[in-house]
């Protein structure tokens, strides 16, 4: 399989993570041919959907139209049960500034300061969308269940990784190796489910 795949994200962390997830399961796809929207100078669309699936499709549609290539996008975030599913689609800008991980973590931990561990259940959610220039669309979803720590732990990962401890684990997502995290992550689950459709679309 020799094809280009564009990722509708301006987040360099996500580009690297998605390359690592896709490379083992799409062995004919050169990781260097998997490029992010920023590398292509693509504008960021307005994410005005009200679900992860809607926002993933908005991003993938915009990039497929801009590049004329099959485009993959994910929309993901943290869903906290005691907060009714928040931050949800607002995860990346929970503290007001998009992508300020430290501020987002600090605000969320402050909001949960009085919540005991049995009630700190949460999950990462990911919707992964594939859109082709001819209008074909396909979406898969994945989750990673866990509980929220009371303070950030670990130097790996990004976003809310330092405070989500996966079910059955004692370490936070930020304390896992990239390989361990990708094997169980919401993003890994969603994108691996997307692979059969990717293979078909890319002509593998």
Image (tube, rainbow, N blue to C red):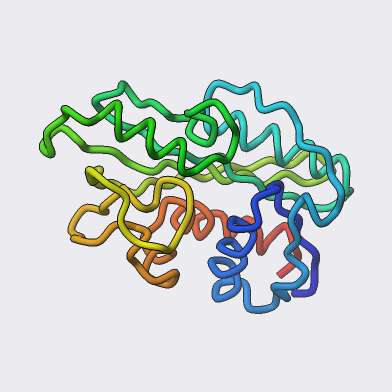
The N terminus, quarter of image: bottom right
Identify the residue at image location x=70%, y=48%.
10
**x and y, in percent, of residue 20 in the image:** 56, 70
Q: Is residue 45 left or right of residue 187?
A: right
Whether residue 182 is visible here, answered yes or no, is: yes
Residue 105: name its quadrant. Answer: top left
Q: Is residue 181 left or right of residue 4?
A: left
Q: Nearer the viewer, residue 14 or 29?
A: 14
Q: Count the marks: how many?
A: 0
The C terminus, quarter of image: bottom right
Identify the residue at image location x=46%, y=37%.
103
Residue 177: name its quadrant. Answer: bottom left
Whether residue 147 is visible here, answered yes or no, is: no
**x and y, in percent, of residue 23 in the image:** 60, 73
Q: Nearer the viewer, residue 101 or 194?
A: 101
Identify the residue at image location x=59%, y=61%.
18
Residue 50: name its quadrant. Answer: top right
Identify the residue at image location x=26%, y=54%.
166
**x and y, in percent, of residue 173 in the image:** 35, 58
**x and y, in percent, of residue 125 in the image:** 42, 41
């Amino acid at each position: 399989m020799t094809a280009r795949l564009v990722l509708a994200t301006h987040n360099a962390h996500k580009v690297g993570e998605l390359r690592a997830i896709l490379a083992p399961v799409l062995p004919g796809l050169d990781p260097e041919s998997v490029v992010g929207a920023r590398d292509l100078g693509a504008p960021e669309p307005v994410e005005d959907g009200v679900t992860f699936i809607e926002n993933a499709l908005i991003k993938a549609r915009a990039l497929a139209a801009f590049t004329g290539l099959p485009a993959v996008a994910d929309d993901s975030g943290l869903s906290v049960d005691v907060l009714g599913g928040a931050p949800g689609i607002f995860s990346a800008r929970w503290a007001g500034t998009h992508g300020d991980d430290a501020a987002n973590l600090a605000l969320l931990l402050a909001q949960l300061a009085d919540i005991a561990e049995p009630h700190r259940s949460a999950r990462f959610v990911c919707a992964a969308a594939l859109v082709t220039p001819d209008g074909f669309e396909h979406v898969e979803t994945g989750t990673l269940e866990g509980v929220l720590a009371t303070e950030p732990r670990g130097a790996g990962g990004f976003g809310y990784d330092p405070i989500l401890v996966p079910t059955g684990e004692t370490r936070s997502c930020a304390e896992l190796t990239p390989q361990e995290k990708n094997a169980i992550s919401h993003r890994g689950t969603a994108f691996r489910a997307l692979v059969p459709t990717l293979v078909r679309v890319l002509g593998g």
